[in-house]
């Protein structure tokens, strides 16, 4: 798709999009190699009671036969677990790679200072009682972060459980999960909850998922989830990145880092919690992380191609599909089952996951009729019947024919409880088909491993995604397509450059304003950024209003013009369809009287006489300067669609044209804009251009503007553009976050 010329404006193509905002790295240093592969580890506050939190790290390292050096630090002991114990950090004979802080909160800051003075690059702070506790804990955490910045120290935590290098069997932390062994693999995971994060590792491992790294990030005083994401992206052995997230303090970096992962071909799976008011409040007290607005997180996930998951099984299902790294060409799936019911279930879930079940080519259907019994279902989803259990050549021929069909991008296969030697034969054929045709295959197979274990081992060794149910197989297929589609979308975005508009004079004027702009002033600001408004003339007297109306042309709209009345309709300050001079004079008097009655102290600057726009579709555009994400853009159709049906879409600025067009098309009411039931098609290209311009405006004026509301924006028939019918700009107040 070529977005080179839209709405008379030329957008530059060929450079990476400048939409990857906020690329700062909050943790210091070049990477995390010394954290995950430390040559030596100091445990500050080490206890001789190896069952305690301060004794567990040493216990686990010894049990793992850790090859590096362990330095217990505690002035109370001469030795711990047979290891020489040192009185303080300064006494250590060399500089360790990692220091584990396992002392009371009252002593933790002094420990950080000593670690920094020693030049240790990483500190793992297990201690709790910081920002999650509120009050003095927040101040202590701020001081901890200041000390870390002063010494160039990368801190994990505080209030974390530890980390694991599962590939090399190095676990540094406390609790039973850090003593266990897990299958090594390509998933690297971080979690803002220690206990729950390690539970994810344990439960997903039981589902056959192999892990490479796991980090409990706790309060993220210095090193954040996104810092770790950036490291996982560069790690050649990490193939899938996962996270349990309560809130991101550096959320503006999310889209940029996620897009780096897309370019690297590394899917990100995020379990975002704290989406309800109660959940968000719990998250703040748990790890001191902000919950944030769920709609904006989901907008960021979409823009960055992040796959959102909702439980451990969901995480495992998606990881299975994504780990092989084989991308489908499109979203067309052929479903082959030996049970009609399983096919229906898989088809339902596949459709819900955004997949399409295409009709097979006539030649494919003809071939299937030759090899399958007459009572088999040839249509997609296909029921090849249990007859294949007696004649396995039927399944082989079916898979071969389906794989050759040009309408098929992936295959879903439900084999019920096929077992024994037949199961092994099926498995080998599935692997052959997947490899020969480079097609992703998702297998639902629920036979007991005792009777189908060899078949399962063959599939697992070949990287074929295998599930216990058709529902889970369809979810895996949907996740793979979601990631593949995100990569395709990113390739388009990378050929675009978001519009950048700098208006320093407008910024300066807004900064000097003592009050919010009026509607007329707000529309002038929009026009400075290329968003046209309706023709309008302010009037201070009835006579001026009549002259203005005649100049614009009847019928006209008349509105109160006041900096103190934001909701004009509620104040009786709007009249539509004014048809002549006399009606104009009468409306002027009536509107002013209604406004004075509604708000006696309001300043009245006059009346705004405006053209009345017909034959247009009314939409809403808005901006909210979010404290976490920065400018967020809202789009929806006007009236009931936005207010009652909540049929709106969100994106985070900046935006490219392709993103704006996608934003428009994803609302349920888009057919209204697209000419449903004989309506004229709206000027979607001009609307997309207006959205891009609003995003550019929001970034340029971000320091001055809190909210923008364009309601309505009139979308005229195709080729005629858009016009802002009303506009509200709310300025940021002193002390208000961005």
Image: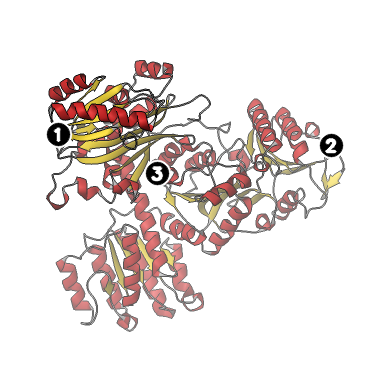
The vertical placement of 5 against 459, above or below, is above
Label 1, label 2: how far apart the Cα atoms are: 79 Å
Q: Which residue is mark 2?
A: 87
Tell me where residue 636 appears, x and y as whole percent.
30, 43
- Seen from the viewer's position, the closer of residues 235 and 634 is 634
Q: How many angstroms separate mark 3 from mark 1 (CA)?
A: 30 Å
Residue 2 in view in this figure: no
Marks 2 and 3, the one that precedes in the sequence? 2
In this picture, is 726 found above or below 618? above
In-front residue for pair 448/586: 586
Helix, strand or loop at label 1? It is: loop
- Picture quadrant where residue 104 is located: top right
Pointer 1 or 2: first along the chain:
2
Query: In the image, residue 1 lies at what x, y percent?
Result: 22, 40
| Residue with the mark numbered 3 | 299
Question: Which x, y percent locates residue 561?
Answer: 31, 25
Circle 1 sits on which residue?
720
Of helix, strand and loop, which one carries label 3?
helix
Q: Given contact means CB atoms under 8 Å apart, are the residues at marks 3 and 1 in contact? A: no
Quarter of the figure with residue 132: top right
Residue depth check, mark 3 versus mark 1: number of the one nearer the observer: 1
Whole-number angstrom distance, CA of label 2 to CA of label 3: 51 Å
Left or right? Give the position of 408 relative to 288: left
> In the image, 154: left or right of 635?
right
* In this view, 264 is above or below 348: above
Q: Find residue 29 and report its horizontal and vertical position in percent.
A: 58, 31
What colour scheme has been applied to the protein in the rendered image? Answer: secondary structure
């Amino acid at each position: 798709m070529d977005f080179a010329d839209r709405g008379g404006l030329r957008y530059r193509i060929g450079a990476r999009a400048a939409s990857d905002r906020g690329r700062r790295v909050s943790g210091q240093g070049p990477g995390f190699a010394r954290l995950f592969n430390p040559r030596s580890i100091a445990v500050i506050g080490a206890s001789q009671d190896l069952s305690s939190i301060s004794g567990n790290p040493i216990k686990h390292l010894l049990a793992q036969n850790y090859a590096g050096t362990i330095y217990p630090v505690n002035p109370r002991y001469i030795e711990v677990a047979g290891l020489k114990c040192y009185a303080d950090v300064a006494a250590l004979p060399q500089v360790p790679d990692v220091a584990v802080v396992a002392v009371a909160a009252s002593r933790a800051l002094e420990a950080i200072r000593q670690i920094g003075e020693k030049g240790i690059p990483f500190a793992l702070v297990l201690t709790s009682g910081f920002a999650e506790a509120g009050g003095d804990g927040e101040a202590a955490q701020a001081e901890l972060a200041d000390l870390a910045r002063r010494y160039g120290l990368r801190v994990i935590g505080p209030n974390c459980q530890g980390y694991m290098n599962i590939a090399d069997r190095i676990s540094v932390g406390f609790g039973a999960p850090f003593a266990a062994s897990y299958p090594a693999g390509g998933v690297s995971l971080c979690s803002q909850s220690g206990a729950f994060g390690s539970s994810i590792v344990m439960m997903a491992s039981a589902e056959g998922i192999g892990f490479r790294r796991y980090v409990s990030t706790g309060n993220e005083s210095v090193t954040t989830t996104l810092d770790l994401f950036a490291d996982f992206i560069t790690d050649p052995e990490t193939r899938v990145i996962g996270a349990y997230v309560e809130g991101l303090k550096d959320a503006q970096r999310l889209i940029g880092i996620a897009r780096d992962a897309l370019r690297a071909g590394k899917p990100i799976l995020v379990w975002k919690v704290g989406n309800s008011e109660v959940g968000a409040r719990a998250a703040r007290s748990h790890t001191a992380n902000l919950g944030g607005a769920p709609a904006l997180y989901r907008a960021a996930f979409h823009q960055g191609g992040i796959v959102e998951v909702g439980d451990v099984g969901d995480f495992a299902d998606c990881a299975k599909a994504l780990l092989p790294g084989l991308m489908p060409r499109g979203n067309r799936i052929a479903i082959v089952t030996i049970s009609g019911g399983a096919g229906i279930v898989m088809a339902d879930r596949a459709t819900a996951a955004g997949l399409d079940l295409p009709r097979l080519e006539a030649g494919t259907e003809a071939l299937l009729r030759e090899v399958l019994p007459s009572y088999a279902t040839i249509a997609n989803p296909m029921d090849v019947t249990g007859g294949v259990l007696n004649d396995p050549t039927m399944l082989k021929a079916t898979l071969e024919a389906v794989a050759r069909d040009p309408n098929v991008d992936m295959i879903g296969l439900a084999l019920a409880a096929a077992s024994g030697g037949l199961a092994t034969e099926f498995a080998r054929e599935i692997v052959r088909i997947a490899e020969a045709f480079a097609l992703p295959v998702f297998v639902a197979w629920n036979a007991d491993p005792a009777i189908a274990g060899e078949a399962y081992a063959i599939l697992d060794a070949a990287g074929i995604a295998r599930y216990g149910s058709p529902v889970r197989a369809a979810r895996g297929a949907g996740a793979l397509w979601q990631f593949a589609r995100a990569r395709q979308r990113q390739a388009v975005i990378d050929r675009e450059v978001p519009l950048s508009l700098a208006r320093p004079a407008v910024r300066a004027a807004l900064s000097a304003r003592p009050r919010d702009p009026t509607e007329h002033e707000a529309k002038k600001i929009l026009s400075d950024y290329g968003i046209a408004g309706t023709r309008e003339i302010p009037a201070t007297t009835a006579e001026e209003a009549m002259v203005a109306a005649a100049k614009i042309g009847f019928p006209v709209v008349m509105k109160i013009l006041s900096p103190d009345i934001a909701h004009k309709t509620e104040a009786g300050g709007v009249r539509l369809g004014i048809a002549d001079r006399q009606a104009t004079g009468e409306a002027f008097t009536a509107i002013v009287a209604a406004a004075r009655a509604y708000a006696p102290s309001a300043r009245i600057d006059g009346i705004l006489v405006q053209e009345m726009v017909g034959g247009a579709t009314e939409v809403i555009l808005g901006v909210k300067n979010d404290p976490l994400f920065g400018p967020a853009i809202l789009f929806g159709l006007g009236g009931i669609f936005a207010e009652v049906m909540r049929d709106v879409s969100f994106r985070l600025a900046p935006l490219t044209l392709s993103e704006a067009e996608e934003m428009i098309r994803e609302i349920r009411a888009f057919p209204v804009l697209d000419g449903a039931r004989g309506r004229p098609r709206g000027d979607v290209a001009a609307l997309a251009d207006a959205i891009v311009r609003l995003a550019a405006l929001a970034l340029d004026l971000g320091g001055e503007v809190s909210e923008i509301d364009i309601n309505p924006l009139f979308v005229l028939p195709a080729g005629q553009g858009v016009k802002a019918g009303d506009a509200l700009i709310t300025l940021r107040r002193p002390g208000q976050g961005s």
